[in-house]
Image (spheres, rainbow, N blue to C red):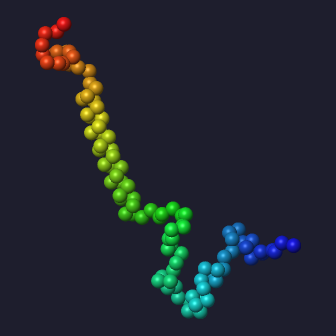
Amino acid sequence: MPIEHDHLNRTNENGFPAVKLNEFLDQQDLDTAIYDPSRDEIGVRTMSDTRKQKLTLRHLNRLKKIRALQKLENLKREDLLGIMYAAPDEAAGGMGGMGGPAF
């Protein structure tokens, strides 16, 4: 006969899962009723952790600078390619070369 876990299926009046505070805090925290950030290990990442890294403002600003730099590089590349592959000027003499007689 399977074991029933009624405490896992409880919901509050809004339909959200009901969670007890003692599921997150250990007995010492419950006794003192004071949150101690130095003992908080929820945000500590390990090598086996598969969660994505949180994006901070520092990360977002770095990404913004990288995108701006890439945009500038693309503009410079487009200007260079425009010069390289532009239609030749008629006054410049056609195909270029050493300036000798045309055959």
Q: Tell me: 54 left or right of 31.
A: left
**As rendered, which of 15 and 81 lies closer to the eye?**
81
Residue 67 seen in this snapshot: yes
Q: Tell me: 89 left or right of 4.
A: left
Residue 13 seen in this snapshot: no
Q: Position of residue 67 (x, y in %)?
A: 36, 49
In this view, 16 is above or below 67 = below
Q: Position of residue 18 (x, y in %)?
A: 69, 74
Q: Quadrant of residue 13?
A: bottom right
Q: Position of residue 54 (x, y in %)?
A: 47, 64
In this view, 76 is above or below 66 = above
Q: Residue furthest left?
A: 100
For the N terminus, give its image quadrant: bottom right
**As rendered, which of 12 and 62 lies closer to the eye?**
62
**As rendered, which of 26 and 7 lies closer to the eye?**
26
Q: Position of residue 9 (x, y in %)?
A: 75, 71
Q: Quadrant of residue 61?
A: bottom left
Q: Tell me: 50 left or right of 14.
A: left
Q: Could you tell me which residue is drawn at 16 percent across and 9 percent down? A: 102
